[in-house]
Image (cartoon, rainbow, N blue to C red):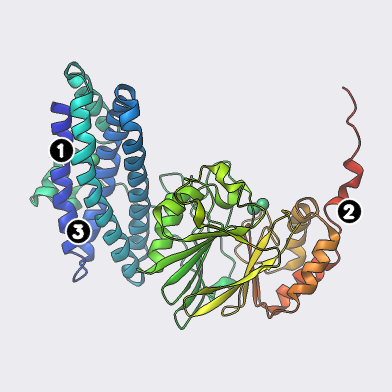
């Protein structure tokens, strides 16, 4: 079919640019990588992948649903992950020389992924399409792909990108859509104290709240990942703890953010292994993407013993279900790299099976929903009194019991906590701010104690 031949031709063009990008990694040639990344964004993502997604996947899904459904889902997942690597690469390019390692890692991951991806499409999907699609559809497919392309790129621009891939064109002459404006610098322990207005939107509509390194010392890092949330979803923080090449991702969230959180995790692991996916409780913002994490990594998922039979409702494949490990009510110590992490009980705060992670190396307490504030865009709490109303609204309703909160404070006072990092909103940094938060918790009336009055039958309108 002409339509398939057209996509195959584009694959050959893409392969040339992948080889060029790979070549530009050693030694690092930033201008060439920049040109390649622009090509991947403009041609591969905005033109080629779009043709497949809007035309071929749809048609094939209709004509050969049973056979094509699985492969299309897998290939779509590749497209999403590829986009996440491109976003990371573009971001690193914008940020400059300090982020060249990240640029190199993102491009290497992208080329690895795409080389395998093109092979899968050439050898599997396109062959399937040749068999399953009626030849009478060919002209319609070609036309639909052309329409799809012209929705995103002019014919001359398309031709120029082809010339770039042939080695005869120069990307600098093109009108390339600029990446998002530079975001704030990646935070580290020194800059975390600064106020950061860090909400900006790139052209994909992502809300890019910059995360950063919270702690780094001797092969041990605690990282606040970028915030990739958007739309109606409540803002949520995702964290990664890495020690000696092993990682634990905490509350990685749902399918909307999955490709970006996975890509960021892999980039921060720098070739290391993800060992754990930690799920503090069962809510949708915690681990709706769990099946994908278990499928795409070799990590075990750790959660309260109360939820191991409930998480499978998110669609956990039975072949990987045994990697969902129950943590007992009392909590546990788990090894990570050359060190250990402490999983703490925080039940009824707010879920009945609720866990937190204390990292004794960084002395950061990853507190899940406890300490969360919604509706305020700050990376760190600088003025506790100003922050208190935001805490109050959330904690009075979402935390289950005053008694549980007091018991938690007693337990946590036995740890040397330097920072509290909640799953939503700003961090509490330094012993004084941590102390203010604990004192406040100790005296808060919440949950059933504050809302017992609600338990009466509603009046009939
Ligand atoms: Fe393709
Ligand atoms: Fe929650
Ligand atoms: Fe939450």
Circle 3 residue = 21
Look at the image and tell me whether residue 181 can be seen. Answer: no
| Number of marks present in the image shown | 3
Name the element at disc 1.
helix
Q: Tell me what residue is drawn at x 44 percent, y 80 percent.
A: 219
Which residue is nearer to you in this view: 61 or 321? 321
Residue 390, image x, y percentages: 73, 56
Q: Tell me what residue is drawn at x 31 percent, y 31 percent.
A: 68
> How many angstroms separate mark 2 from mark 1 (CA)?
65 Å
Name the element at disc 2.
helix
Residue 173, image x, y percentages: 18, 49
Mark seen at residue 8: 1
Residue 358, image x, y percentages: 63, 72
Within the image, what quadrant is residue 139 found in? top left
Dot 1 surroundings within 10 Å: few (below 14), some, or many (20 or more)?
some
Q: Earlier in the sequence, mark 3 or mark 1?
A: 1
Mark seen at residue 449: 2
Q: Earlier in the sequence, mark 2 or mark 1?
A: 1
Can you tell which of label 3 and label 1 is closer to the viewer?
A: 1
Residue 94, image x, y percentages: 35, 61
Which residue is nearer to you in this view: 428 or 328? 328
> How many angstroms separate mark 3 from mark 2 (CA)?
61 Å
Dot 2 surroundings within 10 Å: few (below 14), some, or many (20 or more)?
some
Which part of the image, by quadrant, shows the N terminus?
top left
């Amino acid at each position: 079919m002409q339509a398939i031949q057209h996509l195959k031709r584009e694959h050959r063009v893409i392969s040339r640019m992948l080889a060029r990008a790979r070549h530009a990694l050693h030694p690092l040639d930033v201008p060439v990588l920049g040109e390649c990344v622009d090509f991947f964004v403009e041609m591969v993502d905005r033109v080629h992948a779009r043709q497949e997604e809007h035309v071929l996947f749809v048609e094939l899904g209709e004509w050969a649903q049973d056979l094509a459904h699985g492969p299309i889902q897998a290939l779509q997942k590749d497209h999403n992950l590829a986009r996440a690597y491109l976003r990371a690469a573009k971001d690193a390019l914008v940020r400059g020389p300090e982020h060249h390692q990240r640029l190199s890692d993102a491009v290497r991951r992208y080329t690895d992924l795409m080389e395998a991806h093109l092979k899968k499409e050439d050898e599997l999907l396109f062959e399937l399409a040749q068999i399953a699609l009626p030849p009478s559809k060919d002209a319609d497919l070609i036309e639909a792909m052309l329409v799809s392309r012209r929705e995103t790129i002019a014919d001359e621009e398309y031709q120029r990108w082809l010339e770039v891939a042939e080695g005869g064109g120069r990307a600098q002459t093109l009108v390339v859509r600029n990446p998002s404006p530079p975001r704030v610098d990646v935070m580290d322990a020194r800059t975390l104290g600064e106020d950061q207005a860090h909400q900006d939107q790139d052209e994909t509509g992502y809300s890019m709240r910059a995360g950063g390194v919270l702690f780094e010392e001797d092969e041990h890092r605690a990282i606040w990942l970028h915030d990739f949330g958007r739309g109606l979803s409540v803002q949520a923080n995702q964290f990664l703890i890495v020690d000696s090449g092993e990682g634990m991702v905490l509350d990685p969230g749902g399918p909307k953010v999955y490709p970006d959180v996975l890509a960021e995790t892999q980039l921060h692991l720098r070739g290391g292994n993800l060992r754990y996916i930690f799920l503090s409780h069962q809510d949708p913002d915690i681990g709706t993407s769990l099946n994908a994490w278990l499928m795409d990594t070799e990590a075990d998922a750790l959660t309260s013993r109360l939820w191991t039979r409930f998480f499978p409702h998110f669609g956990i494949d039975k072949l990987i279900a045994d990697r969902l490990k129950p943590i007992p009510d009392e909590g546990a110590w788990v090894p990570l790299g050359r060190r250990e992490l402490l999983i703490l009980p925080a039940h009824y705060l707010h879920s009945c099976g609720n866990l937190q992670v204390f990292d004794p190396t960084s002395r950061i307490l990853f507190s899940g929903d406890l300490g969360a504030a919604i509706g305020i865009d700050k990376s760190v709490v600088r003025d506790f009194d100003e922050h208190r109303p935001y805490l109050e609204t959330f904690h009075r309703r979402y935390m289950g019991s005053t008694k549980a909160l007091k018991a938690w404070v007693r337990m946590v006072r036995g740890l040397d906590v330097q920072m509290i990092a909640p799953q939503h909103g700003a961090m509490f940094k330094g012993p004084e701010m941590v102390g203010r938060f604990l004192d406040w918790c100790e005296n808060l009336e919440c949950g059933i104690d504050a809302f017992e009055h609600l338990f009466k039958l509603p009046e009939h309108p």
